[in-house]
Amino acid sequence: MKIGIVCYPTFGGSGVVATELGKALAQNGHQVHFITYQQPPRLDFFNENVFYHEVNVPSYPLFQYAPYESALTSEMVNVVLNENVDLLHVHYAIPHASAAYMAKMILQSRGRTVPIVTTLHGTDITLVGKDASYEPVVTFSINQSDGVTAVSEDLRRDTYKHFDIHREIEVIPNFIDLSRFKRQQKEHFKKAICPNGEKLIVHTSNFRRVKRIDDAVMVFYEIQKNIPAKLLLVGDGPERARIERLVRDLDIYDQVRFLGKLDAVEEVLSVADLFLMPSEQESFGLAALEAMACQVPVISSNVGGLPELNIQGVTGFLSNVGDVDDMVKNALYVLDDANLPTFQANALAKAKEFELSRILPLYEAYYERVLAVSNEQLSVNS
Ligand code: GMT
């Protein structure tokens, strides 16, 4: 099959899911055409089945906001026509699903049919999408997609709750490549960061408000009052400066390291003892799955799709959003040497349920179904 994948070229979240999915599809013999405004970070290799098409958005003095959606639409039309793409799979509804609908209409006017699959990732529904500025477009483009998937049961429920959707949404959870995300021997690294056997706590995110990184810092602040510990913060984003100030104000700067955007996050996770995800909202929590695959238990908030991944008292613990005290209590319990090995083993066992080899066939089967329905409609109409 020839598949066009549209996504954000980001370090985490939907961009990573889309890139890893495309890579796996290519390895399975499909031809994959990525359409993005920048080369995705994890697309830095050669594979004969992988193609990259950059969306070029020409500027003009009249444009206060460059019309990215129009440029993306045109690129989708061109790629489908030039590369003979069978199906377009867009990740994150805004503005990819509406651009895809427009591309489909343009292609139809030129006698070419291409079905669209939209994958909802989270904030496109729970945070940004339901805002009145976007809601009508998001509702319309979800209803008009030929296939719609959500990355968790909770996100599917939220989509029906917040939008007037009258179509099926398939849940296909995010996945993990266990050959890459596994606990590696990185003892020298651990020794360098924790020379006195401190426990190592890790948080990774895009440093947006929704991640509540202050809570992660406050949880760590309380942990280190009880046991020797260090905190690694991986990622970058708008909250970085504020969080750095908080760490200085708490006078724990020596115990906290900001590592920035890291590609080889599995190396850091390999030496971690605990992962913190105190988010306000999290439709799935891919970063937590990456940690679990590296045998790192998770202390998270009890929101969105997190209870589908982090199992209370098994792979870690979940607390109400902002309940730092409960998170600290649970963290200290997990970090106790008598408990840690069990949580580590459970985290890996749960992560295995999301192994790439289990989830990839779900996408392939879904594409087949969407294509079959599209072809059927075509033969009825002709
Ligand atoms: O919030 C982010 O981390 C970015 C965002 C994205 O789309 O890039 O993440 C969302 O999609 C991820 C991949 O499906 C999920 O693992 C995240 O839980 C989800 N983020 C939120 O719901 C806040």
Image (cartoon, helix red, strand yellow):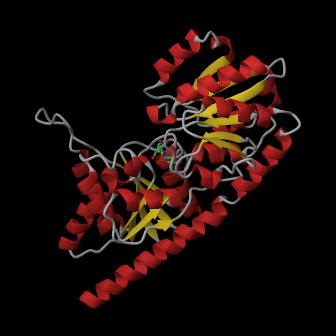
State left or right for residue 320 relative to residue 170.
right
Where residue 35 appears, x then y in whole percent? 38, 53
Residue found at the far right of this picture: 338
Residue at image x 84%, y 17%? 196
Quarter occupied by residue 24: bottom right
State left or right for residue 171 relative to residue 314.
left
> Is 258 placed above or below 353 here?
above
Q: Which of 378 and 319 is in front in this view?
A: 319
> Is 332 placed above or below 254 here?
below
Q: Which quadrant holds the C terminus?
A: bottom left
Where residue 83 appears, x then y in whole percent? 36, 65
Q: Which of 103 and 56 is in front in this view?
A: 103
> Is 379 placed above or below 136 here?
below
Quarter occupied by residue 23: bottom right
Where residue 320 appears, x then y in whole percent? 58, 40
State left or right for residue 373 relative to residue 11.
left
